[in-house]
Amino acid sequence: MRVKLLYFAWLRERIGKNAEEIEPPPGIATVADLVAWLTKQGDEYAHAFENPGVVRAAIDRAHVKADAPIAGAREIAFFPPMTGG
Amino acid sequence: MSAASISLQQEHFDAAAEVAALTRGRTDIGAVVTFTGICRGEENGAPITALTLEHYPAMAEAEIARQIEAAQSRWSLLCVRVIHRFGRIAPGEDIVLVVTASSHRHDAFAAAEFLMDYLKTRAPFWKQVEQAGASSWVAAKETDEAAAARWTKPRAAAE
């Protein structure tokens, strides 16, 4: 099941892309699993996710925690803590 | 559910005109609270040239709508208007507008503060600051997280 990944702010800068489509391999059940898998995809990902505690995620435009299941997600976004307002 | 309107835009806004548009012809509104967030000229003690706000458009709209719904369920509001700019913003320029209207002042004040605390911590915007020819990402503040957390404490413990 293909899913669109979006990256913002310094995560986007470190990875070098603002979006991509991937097909997560079997066994990737949660956001945390996905981050761990992405970290292995290259140095740029490892650098972006080196402090997973600081990375926030959203599934289909709503905030989720690291243990959120990704099954059925169409869009998963990763970003640093927000500084709007 | 009362009326609510959200705009995400690069352009400047006119707070006074927004308030006038909300209240025109109405006699049910007894209180309007208007908050404007403004770009300051310094960050971490040093002058800045500009702020640039990146955002996640679809999620920003959805998230602000959720925050307004939460405010509407907690307080008695007649209307809410939120405007959040993105893109390059110079010192002295407005960044964000929150307007809340109710029959009586308590609800308008509380809802405006709640919405700002949530906008600071949950709306997907990220600020980059230009200082001395270099750009860097502004770090989220713990004080903003603490402010947002106040709203989920039980009433007796809230400040």
Image: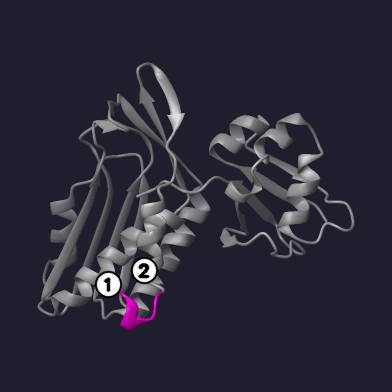
Residue at the image position 48 percent from the left and 61 percent from the top: B62
Per the rendering, the mark at residue A25 is: none
Residue pointed to by mark 2? B150
Q: Residues within 10 Å of mark 2 (few under 14, many from 20)?
A: some
B89 vs B128, nearest the viewer? B128
Residue type at mark 1: give it: Glu
B15 vs B20, nearest the viewer? B15
Residue A28 left/right relative to A4: right
> Where's residue B138, x and y in %?
42, 37
Residue A28, by quadrant, is bottom right
B3 vs A33, nearest the viewer? A33
Residue A27 left/right relative to B33: right
Circle nearer the N terminus (2, 1)? 2
Residue A34 left/right relative to B40: right
Which residue sits furthest bottom? Answer: B156
Residue A8 left/right relative to B48: right
Residue B93, by quadrant, is top left
Per the rendering, the mark at residue B159 is: 1
Q: Marks 2 and 1: CB-CB under 8 Å?
A: yes
> Where's residue A39, x and y in %?
76, 41
Query: Numbered disc 1: what chain?
Result: B
Residue A50, by quadrant, is top right
The answer to whether residue B120 of the structure is visible from this angle is no
The magenta-colored residue range is B153-159
